[in-house]
Image (cartoon, rainbow, N blue to C red):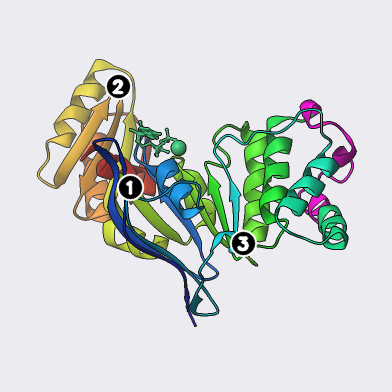
Amino acid sequence: MTRTLLQVRELSKRFKEREVVKGISFNITEGSCAALLGPNGAGKTTTISMLAGLLQPSGGSIELLVNGSPTTDRRPYIGFLPQMPVFYPWMTGVEFLLYAGELAGLTSREVKSETGEWLEAVGLREAGKRRIGSYSGGMKQRLGLAQALIHRPKLLILDEPVSALDPTGRKDVLTLLQRIRRETTVLFSTHVLHDAEEICDEIIMIRNGDIALQGSLDHVRRTYSEPVIRLEVGGDEASRSWLTAACGKDFVIHSEVSGGRAKMKVANVEQASRALMADAVSHRIMIRSLEAGHSTLEDLFLKVVQA
Ligand SMILES: Nc1ncnc2c1ncn2[C@@H]1O[C@H](COP(=O)(O)OP(=O)(O)OP(=O)(O)O)[C@@H](O)[C@H]1O
Ligand SMILES: [Mg+2]
């Protein structure tokens, strides 16, 4: 059974005269992993800060339902990792988690056992004895995750958890999130589509403080993915002008060409690829690659963002 954990209605935020979150509504289902997507300045951090209880909304409501009933104070049930977490570099990882656990209201016995458990879970058991000042970006982010999870929240909220990390750090954190999401409902913001596609099942896309698109990843894919052919030809003049001409064929609905590459939106991928291949052969054009597939979430994101 799917049960709503977080219910957001007409949520808005105004800074002076400027409304940066414009009455957005969405639900987060218990056990799901939702991505809040949007370009820089879309309002992700503002929205997330309101959900985490760090920023007072200008209007609307946020309700967290525990076992189906609304809570008066949702903060104990939420774990939060900010976009730019700040650590005391002189503390060790262990000290930091002990401190975070106390702040979260755990008993001293709980603090000790949870600290050990989470250090292990985020792969910092050994490094926990060292000062945070010596940690890499990925290690800091994993420590931040341990801090956000130490009181076993119902909902874990993360603001751009991987955007500042190198590929290794990113992979570490994403793998960890994938594991966590089996037990905890997760909401994270990102502008990296690929990350959302990898671990989320729900997406909420915002643009200029408004929801541009929302739904399950499957639904969004099914509804919005379009048949697309990606074609690359040889670098000579003849190939390039053939490519430009090919984009003008009547089965091409829309196309983008740059250099020797083209992306064509077509009605029927199979028919279009056959026609293109046959035409290329008869004109003796060298095709470097032809990929017949569907538009990606990235294509959709760009379309929504630029609309
Ligand atoms: N304290 C504030 N006072 C005034 N304007 C603010 C404040 N905080 C955010 N804004 C504005 O609100 C808009 C949304 O900002 P926000 O930080 O929520 O975007 P974001 O989607 O998180 O962007 P990014 O991807 O860069 O993190 C921006 O135009 C920003 O300038
Ligand atoms: Mg932000």
Q: Amino acid at mark 1?
A: Ile
Residue 83 image offset from top left, x and y in percent: 54, 38
Q: Quadrant of the C terminus?
A: top left
In-front residue for pair 72/132: 72
Q: CA distance from mark 1 to mark 2?
A: 32 Å
Q: Which residue is mark 1?
A: 206
Q: Which residue is mark 2?
A: 259
Of marks 3 and 1, the one in the foreground: 3
Q: Identify the magenta region.
A: 118-134
**In the figure, residue 239 lies in which quadrant?**
top left
Ligand 1 resides in the quarter of the picture at top left
Residue 301 image offset from top left, x and y in percent: 33, 44
User: Nearer the N terminus, badge 1 or badge 2?
Assistant: 1
Residue 76's disc number: 3
Looking at the rendered structure, the secondary structure element under dot 2 is loop
**In the figure, residue 233 lies in which quadrant?**
top left
Whether disc 1's CB lies below 8 Å from ligand 1 is answered: yes
In-front residue for pair 223/120: 120
Of marks 3 and 2, the one in the foreground: 3
